[in-house]
Amino acid sequence: MDQTINSLTKPNGRMCNDRGFTLIELITVLAILAIIAAIAVPRFTGTIETAKMKADQVTLDILQQAVNQYMIENNGHSPNKEDLQNGYIDGDWPEPQQGGKFEIDDNGNVLLNKDKQLVE
């Protein structure tokens, strides 16, 4: 019995508890995780915005190709959204990932109207 008690005490007489982490160890791990999060989060949010911009550009290009095809087949007349939905694009008129809307001007150019600002 004395041997068991002696194995649980340190030489200075205090009880020894080797089953947990110290406060310093926990704070160090939390600090490392906070640093990693501070580096990673801005990269991911920037990546999402970049992906949305690229997706809108691809959609814009596809719509422009559909308009060009329509104009070739209809003697240069500029289509409206309904004209393109009848055989030139699949499904409903697309919505931009970044907000706003896709529009077709009188010359057959597809534009992204975003907050009263036209972007080609």
Image (tube, grey):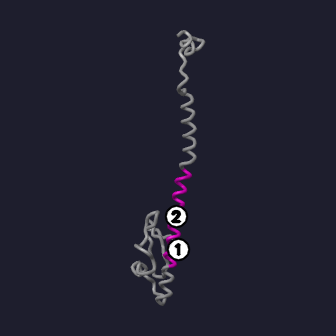
First reached walking from the N terminus: tag 2 or tag 1: 2
* Residue in front for this viewpoint, 85 or 77: 85
Seen as rendered, the residue at the extreme top is 2
Residue depicted at 57% across the width and 43% down the height: 36
Query: What SS does tag 1 mark?
Result: helix
The secondary structure making up most of the magenta span is helix
> What amino acid type is highlighted by mark number 2?
Met
Residue 51 vs 7, above or below: the answer is below
In whole angstroms, how far apart are the C-alphas of marks 2 and 1?
A: 12 Å
Residue 102: name its quadrant. Answer: bottom left
Q: Which residue is mark 1?
A: 61
Residue 82 visible, this orientation? yes
Badge number at residue 14: none
* Residue in front for this viewpoint, 4 or 18: 4
Residue depicted at 53% across the width and 15% down the height: 15
- Residue 34 x/y as whole percent: 54, 40
Residue 109 vs 25, above or below: the answer is below
Badge number at residue 53: 2
Neighbor class of circle 2 (other Cα within 10 Å; few <14, some 14-19, many 20+) is some
- Residue 23 x/y as whole percent: 53, 27
Residue 82: name its quadrant. Answer: bottom left
- Residue 54 x/y as whole percent: 54, 65
From which residue to which does the magenta span run?
A: 42-65
